[in-house]
Amino acid sequence: MVLTGVSVAALAACAKVGEDVFNHETEPFDQPIRNWMLAQRSAVADRVFLFATNAGSPRVIIPCTGAVAAWLWGRKGLPIAGAVVLAPAVASALFLAIKRVYARARPAGGARMNELTYAFPSGHATASAAIFGVVSYVLWREHMLEEGPAIALGVLPPLLIGSSRVYLDVHWTTDVLGGWSVGALVAALSAVVYERVRKNTRRAIPSW
């Protein structure tokens, strides 16, 4: 029931943000946040957010997810590991496809940082929300993390990574909100797959 609720909420958020971006209605929301972020720039914050954006890049966290899946394979078996690998695969396909549909230009910081692909949705936000969301859920369900640390793992890294994209002026805020929404939807659906796999795996284990 919780996963269904999260899926529905994420889908509704995706639809709302996507509609506003498609209809070019986001500037009154995006531009003031961009102006405020640019006014907060400092050398220390630049280093912190640049580290977050580099560490949270899909090309970094997706291979790390493969390592987590390999570890889970060794501990829990292939089916559960496969449910974890599903998240980055689906997230990557979605944000690349959606970018082509919307073809939204980035703010000026994108050119300065040589990030010239389309803006919506943020790939960093999408991948991080999907990956950290499903990994934290699986680790909690497998009793490898307590609830509090699992929630922190699922929420804080995507929050920092997504915020870094706005701070560095390579994405509009709605790009990040859209990415988080798509990522949350992927994480919830991957968690549903995990629950089905987990149930079937346990059912297949004979009881003597």
Image (cartoon, helix red, strand yellow):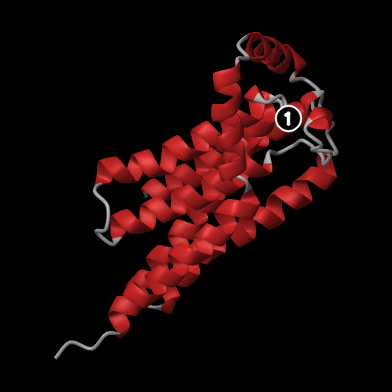
Compare residues 12 and 90 and report the one nearer the observer.
90
What's the residue at 58%, 39% (across, down)? 181
Q: Which residue is mark 1?
A: 170
Circle 1 packing at 10 Å, graded few (<14), some (14-19), many (20+), is many
Residue 156 drawn above or below residue 28? below
Residue 192 shown left or right of residue 109 in the figure: left
Q: Is residue 11 visible?
A: no
Where in the figure is residue 59, as x and y percent of width and height? 65, 54
Name the amino acid type tagged 1. Val
Task: From the top left corner, tell me how far across and down residue 161 is, in percent.
Answer: 56, 36
Q: Label 1: state its secondary structure.
A: loop
Q: Position of residue 49 (x, y in %)?
A: 57, 29
Q: In front here: 163 or 190?
A: 163
Q: Quadrant of residue 16?
A: top right
At horizontal 43% and vertical 78% (from top left) the residue drawn is 78
Q: Is residue 18 above or below residue 88?
A: above
Quadrant showing the C terminus: bottom left
The residue at the point 70 percent across, 18 percent down is 30
Task: Kindly identify the residue that appears in the image at 63 percent across and 39 percent down.
Answer: 179
Write down the quadrant of residue 124 in the picture.
top right
Residue 97 is left or right of residue 192, and the answer is right
